[in-house]
Image: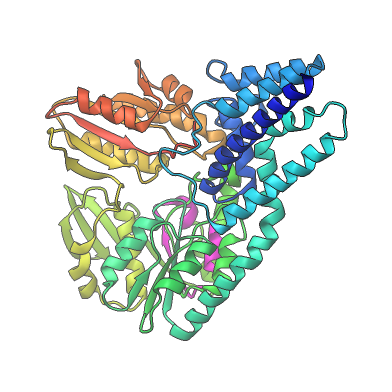
């Protein structure tokens, strides 16, 4: 009988392990296989509303979760040497926890790429080795029991072990991209910044005219794998200008990109607390972004940003040509100033054009794009003629009126403190006569600033007289603390959208601010 029970429990533990493996592989893939991400997300799901890596903040959370209860029971049963009860507990954890972390996924499912299959195989082999070693112990269920709980750690170890292998595999595509750049010889314009990269890239492509030998990297292809793929797939013979968006999660990454994709013109849009959770400080973010200037002949800076304004002297001393841009700094060489719903484009102190402002487009990003296009050799006249082609990025402060008569502001592309304020101001500027509602999961990856920034965001929502609808648990506590009144909360964006459609009528307005994938709690 005891052998049959142990066999039954062993099969159950195997199933629980596989379910946990599928859950956490999806998180690893969504987080671009950054090993440390698994541990951060384990903390998020184990302790809801964790918004800082500091241990002092770990216990400011919502009510106790099922996963916490099961882990405590597991420790208790192991202490009592009740391995079968511990195995049952681990099976329950593996099947149901973390509650809400879907295996299939609502927003994205597993894509069984070569890399994902390799990680899954290595994690499974490591698990077999651990279980095999455990069979030598009289407590044969202890190793597989512990393994179910430790799946995120197992995947983290696998990703770390495979990193050198993946680096070598990626090098082949980088070499192909580098060779294509040498053969085609386009002018490379590289764009980075904590935010505004994609918008500025799109605006620059519109100003230059994509039908005139201009190729821009696709929307999110801004790391080594994405940029090399963009070049290998899109850089045709006759391409004269290649616009490369460059992102980073740490120092050295942009420098590495520039080593094989060297820009002649570098554009920096802003320095802010985006990815602060990973990069730890604004100083490190600034240092990482500065790397894009090393090989560039010309550097375009948005000097509305005080940190970027401070770069001018250093770059000039290095012999760089610096072109300044902005929307508020009157000394910028390219100024796109907004007055009375009009954009006024000023180049070297002379107004060259005025046009109606485009909703959802930030004037400073247009100024950076205009300045870069000038440095690429385009005439002022040709750029003025192309100003009408500038459009907002999809899901970035796009304003539409739904068939129901409700005005919808879609700002779900991503969000940071600066863009969130712009989106709220846009909603307020519409001067709708009915209810204003803001649907948001809050702001993420702000490290120790995240709690305060989400409180401030909720406070601004209340100041604008809007209702607050919170999606998910990630920032629910901080948003609730900052809001004056009682916000609504839904577990998923789909539930929030359903409520909006049932509650709002003609004359009302809703701002969808940010959208988190469902591997966030």
Quarter of the figure that contains the N terminus: top right
| Highlighted range, magenta | 289-309
Residue plotted at (64% across, 47% down):
35
**Image location of residue 220, percent across then percent down:** 43, 56
Q: Is residue 17 magenta?
A: no
- Nearest the viewer among 183 and 280 is 183
Q: As rendered, which of 176 and 464 lies closer to the eye? A: 176
Image spot of residue 41 (x, y percent): 58, 36
What residue is rendered at 63% in x and 55% in y? 118
As displayed, is residue 155 above or below residue 260?
above
Q: Say if 412 sits above or below 320 in the image.
A: above
Rendered residue at 27%/37% (across/down): 425
Left/right of residue 52 with respect to residue 475 in the rendered view = right
Q: Which residue is drawn at 78% across and 44% down?
A: 129
Q: Which residue occupies the foreground of this view, 224 or 246?
A: 224
Figure quadrant of residue 236: bottom left
Residue 305 inside the magenta-drawn segment: yes
The answer to whether residue 57 is seen in the rendering is no
Answer yes or no: is residue 103 visible: yes
Left or right for 351, reference 181: left
Residue 163 quadrant: bottom right
Q: Where is residue 73 in the image (x, y as percent from the top left)?
A: 69, 16
User: How many labels sit on residues?
Assistant: 0
């Amino acid at each position: 009988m005891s052998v049959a029970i142990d066999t039954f429990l062993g099969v159950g533990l195997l199933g629980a392990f596989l379910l946990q493996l599928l859950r956490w592989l999806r998180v690893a893939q969504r987080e671009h296989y950054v090993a440390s991400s698994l541990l951060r997300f384990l903390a998020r799901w184990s302790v809801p509303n964790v918004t800082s890596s500091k241990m002092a903040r770990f216990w400011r959370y919502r009510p106790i979760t099922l996963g916490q209860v099961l882990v405590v029971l597991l420790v208790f049963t192991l202490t009592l040497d009740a391995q079968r009860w511990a195995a049952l507990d681990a099976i329950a954890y593996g099947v149901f926890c973390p509650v809400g972390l879907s295996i299939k996924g609502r927003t994205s499912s597993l894509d069984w790429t070569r890399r994902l299959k390799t990680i899954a195989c290595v994690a499974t082999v490591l698990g077999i080795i651990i279980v095999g070693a455990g069979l030598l112990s009289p407590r044969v269920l202890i190793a597989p029991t512990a393994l179910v709980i430790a799946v995120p750690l197992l995947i983290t170890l696998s990703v770390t072990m495979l990193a050198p292998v993946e680096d070598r595999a990626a090098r082949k595509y980088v070499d192909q991209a580098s060779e294509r750049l040498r053969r085609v010889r386009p002018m490379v314009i590289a764009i980075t910044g904590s935010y505004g990269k994609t918008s500025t890239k799109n605006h620059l492509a519109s100003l230059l005219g994509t039908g005139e030998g201009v190729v821009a990297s696709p929307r999110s292809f801004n790391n080594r794998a994405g940029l090399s793929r963009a070049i290998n797939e899109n850089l045709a013979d006759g391409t004269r200008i290649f616009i490369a968006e460059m992102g980073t999660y740490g120092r050295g990454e942009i420098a590495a990109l520039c080593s094989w994709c060297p820009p002649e013109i570098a554009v920096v849009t802003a320095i802010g607390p985006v990815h602060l959770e990973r990069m730890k400080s604004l100083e490190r973010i600034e240092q990482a972004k500065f790397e894009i200037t090393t090989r560039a002949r010309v550097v375009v800076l948005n000097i509305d940003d005080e940190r970027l304004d401070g770069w001018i002297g250093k770059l000039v001393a290095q012999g760089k040509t610096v072109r300044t841009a902005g929307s508020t700094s009157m000394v910028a060489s390219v100024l796109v100033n907004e007055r009375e719903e009009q954009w006024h484009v000023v180049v070297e102190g002379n107004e060259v054009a005025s046009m109606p402002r485009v909703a959802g487009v930030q004037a400073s990003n247009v100024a950076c794009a205009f300045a870069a296009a000038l440095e690429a050799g385009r005439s002022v006249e040709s750029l003025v003629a192309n100003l009408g082609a500038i459009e907002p990025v999809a899901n970035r402060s796009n304003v539409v009126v739904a068939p129901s008569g409700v005005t919808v502001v879609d700002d779900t592309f991503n969000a940071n403190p600066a863009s969130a304020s712009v989106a709220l101001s846009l909603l307020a500027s519409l001067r709708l006569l009915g209810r204003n509602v803001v649907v948001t999961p809050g702001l993420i990856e702000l490290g120790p600033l995240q709690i305060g920034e989400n409180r401030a965001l909720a406070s601004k929502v209340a100041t604008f007289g809007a209702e607050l609808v919170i999606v998910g648990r990630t920032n629910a506590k901080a948003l609730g603390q900052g809001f004056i009144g009682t916000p609504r909360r839904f577990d998923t964006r789909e539930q929030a959208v359903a409520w909006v459609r049932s509650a709002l009528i003609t004359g009302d307005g809703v701002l969808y601010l940010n959208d988190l994938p469902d591997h966030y709690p």
